Amino acid sequence: MNRIVALFIVFLLLVACVPTPDEEAVLNRTDGALEQAITEPPVTPYVYEAPARWEETYTVRKREIRFEADVEVPTAEQFPVETVKQYRIAGGDVVSFLEKLCPGDWDIRENELSREELTEDLKHAANMYLGEDDDTGEPVYGPNEEEMQRIQKQIEQAPLEDSYIPLSTVLQFPVTNTPVKNSRGETWYLSAQSKETRSSVRLARHRDSSVQTEQAVMQVGSAPYRPDGLKNVKISREDAIRVCEETLSALGFAGFRAADAEKAIEAQSYSLAELSEGYLVHAVFALEGTVPCCYAQASSQNFIQTGDNPDATFAPPWQQEFLELYVTEEGVQQIWWSQPKEHVLVANENVKLMPFEAFRQSFQKLIEFGTGDYADSPLIVKRLVLTTAIAQIPNQGDEAFLIPAWAIFLTTEDDQAAHIAPHVLLINAIDGSTIRVQ
């Protein structure tokens, strides 16, 4: 651990108080308990014991609580902790990322828009959303004359042929939906940003397209709307995951593993014309002894008040690093690398996790104290995963701990019926404290 963090932890150890068991699952720790556990000598290898499934039903203040969850714990004897830093992507990282995906030079287009793209925009402007009918409230579509005139002028000024130059010589942030061409002659659309706390690289085969999961398009009012789910996926889930793993290997993303795969659809953002159906696969970094689990895009739970002090984290919560791939029978159609982290060192090779029974009791107390005092749709715990999460170090903004943590996915009967994705609650598997999710 670097000298600043080490000195700070020594200070925390001198002033830390031993928490009472009743506080474990309710408050974010600011007393140094996590740091103390991490700086203890590594324990001898052990197998973490937990049931395969948790099934239980009871009522808290007129609200039914149902546990219908598999408990996902890997077979492991080591539970390490690492320190990480936020990583700001540089231009060389983007070039390297692309060259690993497809070896050889990549070129970027000089002209902002091509005549072909502008022609597509002109067609869209000829049938744009103009508002709602005053009498019926129905959406009204028609030509936007002003927009069509503007695009027509752009077409007249656009070059007859596109021109490309080497990407490595001109890359500047931010890059937004800009065509790049690889050594195979394939055109992709590149977006990239580089900020202190938010960096990402995204590649897509189609301009102005978006990918929605099957669960999302089954929701009433979604666009596109598929109430019966996606029926035209031609690739298997296993093959999609295999493509993800091959991509991870090509990129050299050591420690990353596929976490989930869900049917998805790609459509044009403005016309909603369907382009393809496939699988959306997420890969995340997972410490040894933990299950890969992508919680980055799940919202923090709003069914339980954890009692957290927002100031206790001393900084906004860090987001999870992930790689998202949209895969069809034709291969990867979109790839997104977001929130990269720099792995500094192993802070402890094997920490002692709180026993599952202690975690179970603490979590039940959290539900009992945090569930609102009103009747509502039954609260359902759908999944418990011993995974990897980021726990911040108080007063130390540049480094954080990567620790074993419980990801708890919660929903309600109403949300399930409306196809709304579960919410997530993170609990530190070492000391039982809650971890804020942005």
Image (cartoon, rainbow, N blue to C red):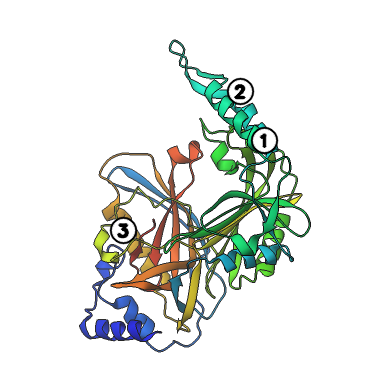
The correct choice, above or below, for 433 with respect to 151 in the image is: below
In the depicted view, which residue is nearer to us: 262 or 335? 335
Q: Which residue is mark 2?
A: 126
| In the image: residue 402, left or right of residue 169 | left
Query: Earlier along the polypeptide chain: callout 2 or callout 1?
Result: 2
Query: Earlier along the polypeptide chain: callout 3 or callout 1?
Result: 1
Find the distance from the CA under tag 3 to the CA under tag 1.
Answer: 44 Å
At mark 2, the secondary structure is loop
Q: Quadrant of residue 2?
A: bottom left
Q: Residue furthest top?
A: 135
Residue beneath the point at 43% across and 81% down: 351
Q: Amino acid at mark 2?
A: Ala
Asked if labels 2 and 3 touch by Cβ distance under 8 angstroms, the answer is: no
> Horizontal and vertical percent for residue 341?
49, 69
Residue 49 visible in rendering: no
Query: Earlier along the polypeptide chain: callout 3 or callout 2?
Result: 2
